[in-house]
Amino acid sequence: MANVRQYNNFVTASEVIANAFTNQATDTALISESILDVAELAHIKPMLGLDMYEELKIQNHNGTLTTANSDLLTHYLKPALYWYTRFEVMNEIQYNTTSAGLVVNVSEFSNPANVEQFNQMKSDTFRKAQVMSDDMIAYIMHDDQNNDYPLFGQDGDTSMPNLDGDMAKKMNGIIFY
């Protein structure tokens, strides 16, 4: 397994805000590098498989993206990752951890959403990310791209967690069996 964690993330905080946030004045500092890492590792890496994920990270870092990988990154992976990143950062934006504990961020010009509204927005954000990632997978697997992504779904070794096995999955508060 290559050390691809040393390479830049596929998207930046500015790109996420420009493409997945209504308020374009959102502070980019709210979307840290570690949140971008989490979004990639939790949502993109398992979807693509370790080998393809590493290939994309290395090619993106070196500026050697193949035409197929460049198209995938630009038109499919990044749009999905924008929404996954928004999903991952929503709790950080809504709440703040202080020495006094967990507090709700409140502005003098607005009121925070109640728990039901917040959960509805978070679920809708995840749904949008899933729509984009489903479109990405359909693109990769389509006959037109038959030989363009040979590493798709390849894990290279057995160190990857079994994400498709016969186990329960919890995704955004819903348990799937």
Image (cartoon, rainbow, N blue to C red):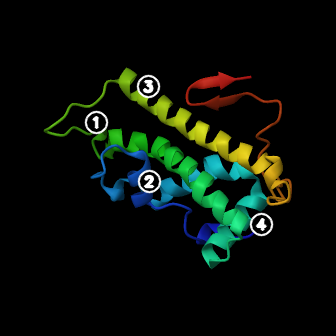
| Residue 159 in view | no
Going from the N terminus, do you reach mark 4 or mark 3 first?
4
The residue carrying mark 1 is: 104
The residue carrying mark 4 is: 1
Q: Callout 3 environment at 10 Å: few (<14), some (14 to 19), or many (20+)?
A: few
**In the image: residue 116, left or right of residue 47:** left
Going from the N terminus, do you reach mark 2 or mark 1 first?
2
Q: Residue at x 62, y 47 (%)?
A: 42
**For the residue labelled by badge 2, is the local secondary structure a helix, a strand or a loop?**
helix
Q: Callout 1 environment at 10 Å: few (<14), some (14 to 19), or many (20+)?
A: some
Please report contact status of discs 4 and 3: CB closer than 8 Å, yes or no. Answer: no
**For the residue labelled by badge 4, is the local secondary structure a helix, a strand or a loop?**
loop
Q: Where is residue 161 in the image (x, y as percent from the top left)?
A: 77, 46
Q: Residue at x 71, y 60 (%)?
A: 53
- Disc 3/disc 1 C-alpha distance (Å): 17 Å
Tag in front: 4 or 3? 3
Amino acid type indicated by mark 3: Gln
Tag in front: 2 or 4? 2
The residue carrying mark 2 is: 16
Q: Is residue 8 above or below residue 168?
A: below
